Amino acid sequence: MGFPGTWMTESESVVYRVVPKCACSTIGQIMYYSDHGSFFDGDIHDAQSGMHKWSMEDSQPLITNNVKNHESYAFTCVRNPYTRILSSFFDKICGIQRNGKRYRGNLVPLLIQKYGIEVGSPEDGFEFDQVKSFRRFLLFARDTIRWRRPMDPDIHWSAMSGHISTFIVNGGRYDKIFWTEQFNDGMQDVLNAIDTPNSIDLAEIPRFNESEGHGPKRAHPVEDYFDDLSMHLVYEIYKRDFNLFKYDFENPGNKMPVAEIDLDEVHAKLGE
């Protein structure tokens, strides 16, 4: 199995387990800058050099050795499950991707046909009933995660605990898990704990949101998208995420965590 979704700086100053939709573009660019003194020109997910990634074969033995021996500080970042699944919907289902096409080709037509979802288009200004369509998308997301139908779950809406656990199960240990909602504080803790070839001033770092601007804007407050049934579905899918990363299930409008993350608890429960 190894360490899928794991990135490491070339200097091996730090190791990061990517969790989709949790500031991963910004984190990747910070790691790149810390080694090279400049940002990667483009989406950091497309970078094939300048950083070690598990998806690149030559990087795998280096990442394996580092992680199994815990030679570098290792971290990851999480996000409120309510805002994360909403973001996945607007980005991946409603949005036009960087290549000018819909995400995963036939996925959106499948959703329109099987779940009655509307997504709008750039031509109509993305005019559609966002709440109704999102709630139908939630049913689809639940079906993929629970029964792997009509397809396997996508990394952008599969549970964060699933991504994070592979690192632990295969012999890694996190030194830090922080919240997207308190990004600067958490990322600063990471930077304070490591030595990098180039220093980073977080106040000067732009936010690299690669999904922004190619889909509809969210028209309502977060809580408007989640009725009682939607909340039940979200809890069914993300129960472990709420519990381990200390988010407020009872109130979709509260994106902030309600307690500190207990790293020992995370390693015990996700390492089983």
Image (cartoon, grey):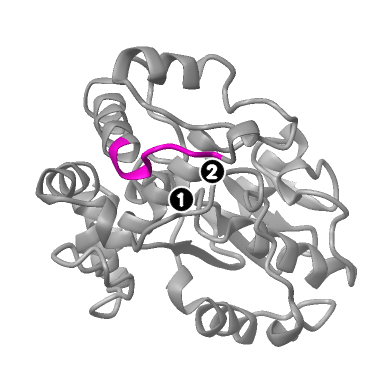
**Looking at this view, is 66 or 105 the one in front?**
105
Residue drawn at the location 73% of the way across and 36% of the way down: 56
Front position in the image: 184 or 192? 184
Q: Disc 1 marks which residue?
A: 87
Q: Residue at x 51, y 79 (%)?
A: 186
Q: Give the spatial CA distance, label 2 vs label 1.
A: 6 Å
Q: Which residues are magenta?
A: 126-132
Magenta includes 130? Answer: yes
Residue 60 in the image, given as x and y percentages of width and height: 67, 40
Q: Is any part of residue 226 visible from this angle?
A: yes
Q: Residues within 10 Å of mark 1 (few under 14, many from 20)?
A: some
Task: Please identify the quarter of the rendering in which residue 30 is found.
Answer: bottom right
Q: Which mark is residue 135?
A: none
- Residue 3 appears in the picture as rendered: no
Check if mark 2's residue and mark 1's residue have beta carbons within 8 Å: yes
Q: Residue at x 23, y 66 (%)?
A: 265
Name the secondary structure under disc 1: helix
